Image (tube, grey):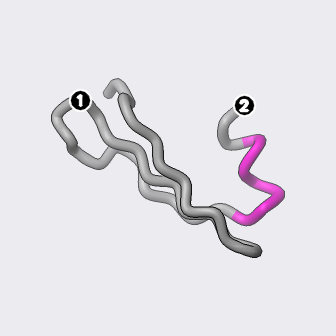
Amino acid sequence: MEITTVGIDLAKSIFQVHAVDAAGHVVVRKALRRAQVVPFFA
């Protein structure tokens, strides 16, 4: 599983994270609260 593209939908309190691999298959689809964003990517 190698993530090639990450998209983030920025909102007021919930951020949607969407990541796909080279073939375009969804690897990650997750809703994060503001406080969870930095720890998720760290």
Residue under label 1: 22
Residues drawn in magenta:
33-39
Q: Nearer the viewer, mark 1 or mark 2?
A: 1
> Which residue lies at the image location 75% right of the left edge and 74% below the top edge?
13
Asked if residue 12 lies left or right of residue 8, the reply is: right
Q: Residue furthest left?
A: 23
Q: Is residue 26 left or right of residue 39?
A: left
Q: Secondary structure at mark 2?
A: loop
Q: Main secondary structure of the magenta part?
A: helix
Question: Picture coordinates of residue 27 (x, y %)?
Answer: 34, 43
Q: Quadrant of the C terminus?
A: top right
Residue 19: where, in percent of width, then height?
A: 41, 44
Residue with the mark numbered 2: 42
Q: Position of residue 26 (x, y in %)?
A: 29, 48
Q: Marks 1 and 2, Cα distance to the nearest angstrom?
A: 22 Å
Q: Residue at x 55, y 54 (%)?
A: 8
Q: Quadrant of the N terminus?
A: top left
